[in-house]
Amino acid sequence: MKMKLKIACALLATAPIFAAHAAAENYTLDPTHTYPNFAVEHWGLSMMQGRFDKSSGKFSIDRTSKSGSAEITIETVSVGTGNAKNEPGSPEAAAWGPRSRDEHLRSGDFFNAKEFPSMTFKSTKVVFSGDLPSTVEGNFTMLGVTKPLTLSFERFKCGQNRFSKKDRCGGNAVGKFKRSDFGMKAAIPAVGDEITLNIEFEGDKD
Amino acid sequence: MSTLLDDPLVQAALAPLLLALMVSGVLQRTRFAWLAVVAAIATEVALSTGIGFTPLTASRKVLLLVLLAPLIGLALDLWPRPPRATPALLAALGGGAAVWAFWSVLAQSEPLQMLALAAALALFVGLMLALTLRLRHDGAAGGAATVALGLAVGVTAVLSASIGNFAHGIALAVAGAALLLWQFTSQRALAPGYLGMLSVGLAGALFTGGSFMLAQLPWYAMPALLLVPLAASLNVFAQRPPHLRLAALTLLCVAVASVPMLAAWLAARTPAP
């Protein structure tokens, strides 16, 4: 009897561990519904928008322990701002030369895609507000430089993938940083130093 | 003042020209006048992106080598009798330095492609150095080659989507123009020595290497660039008065520089697939 009581107590003591483990939800980013976007001031006029078409990563949340993690790898060569190529004889080529903005962005002056094919964000801490994450703190690495970056979840919702019926979460994570802190100093101040990063993301539960 | 210094024209051309004129003017009676080349390039970099070496990216390695070149050149100029093989040795070292500078990009290729790229890069830089070092005793030829090479480096760079190397090339060109101007007005030749032509050759070759490795310069523009120092070494105007020879050589070199520019322009105009 005493032994049975001891075993029962031991099992009860470990229950939170199992509960916590069971509460951790792991998601893999859906590359066709995850796009890091960025905005930067151009000539003091418009906020130019661009995005990276290729990225991959994962995230996890644990609503019981109010913790989580996130990691995303962004392919720099996939940068696009709507000006992929200035075709010979086109008005764009006449106005801006034969090389397009996107070609410039991939060059050594900006994202240096040939030397640094990817940039990453890896979380160190997820802060919750109620049952949902509100911010994720982590380290952003671009052009070989790593700096702290905090992303705020402007949106974080969970539901179901209507095709696979898997649990799915998604939202928008937004943060700001100065590109000069990472060594990207070309064309400042004509092209702004401050970058707003807005990662639209969705992922199915593993 | 800050708005003026933010102007790309000031950063790439006016400020480097001013500094090159000052340095070469003050030092024209010494063997250090060709420090104007590194002074112009350093000014341009300091104004545009700032001089820094961490992390040591390919572009920063190139800048480091360009800043070290005049020190090596000066040491050789001060050496009473440098070995006859010095130009060949410098060419080989330059080729190796280029591979070191762009290793972070080369290492991402498949092994065979990496070897081919590294060999081509080293060969290009080595040949550029070998050809430019031949001009080290001739101020007029050296100056003409510097102007033309700088223009070619700059124009091919901007046609290859590299603004940074465009600015570097223009700074190199204006440095050459400053040195030519002093020679023209003072009627005194300013022999470049190893100091001058090692700076010019290495800068021109590595900036071009940057446009190739990090931007979209077509490979065939690189051998075309070798025509510039080759043209400067031709003895076609040797019997002319110094002023005429200086002007004619410069025009010839700039005309030859149009060949790599044309190559880069044609590549840029290739329609998207």
Image (tube, helix red, strand yellow):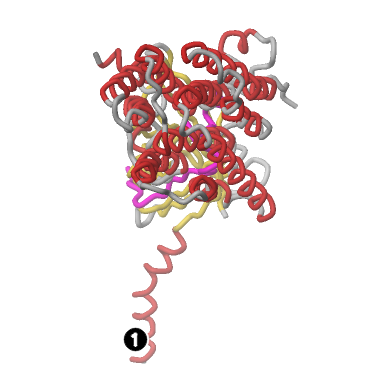
Q: Numbered disc 1: what chain? A: A
Query: What span is colored magenta in the figure?
Result: A101-130
Name the residue located 54 percent from the left edge and 14 percent from the top edge.
B240
Q: Nearer the viewer, residue A187 or B66?
A: B66
Q: Nearer the viewer, residue A51 or B137?
A: B137
Quarter of the image where one finds residue A11: bottom left
Q: Is residue B68 left or right of residue B102?
A: left
Q: Amino acid at mark 1?
A: Lys
Q: Is residue A147 left or right of residue B252?
A: left
Relative image position of residue B209 (x, y in whole percent): 55, 37
Q: Quadrant of the C terminus of chain A?
A: bottom right
Relative image position of residue B115 (x, y in whole percent): 65, 53
Residue holding disc 1: A6
Name the residue located 46 percent from the left edge and 51 percent from the top edge.
B83
- Residue B245 covered by magenta stretch: no
Above or below residue A197? Residue A65 is: below
Above or below residue A163? Residue B96 is: below
Quarter of the image where one finds residue B50: top left
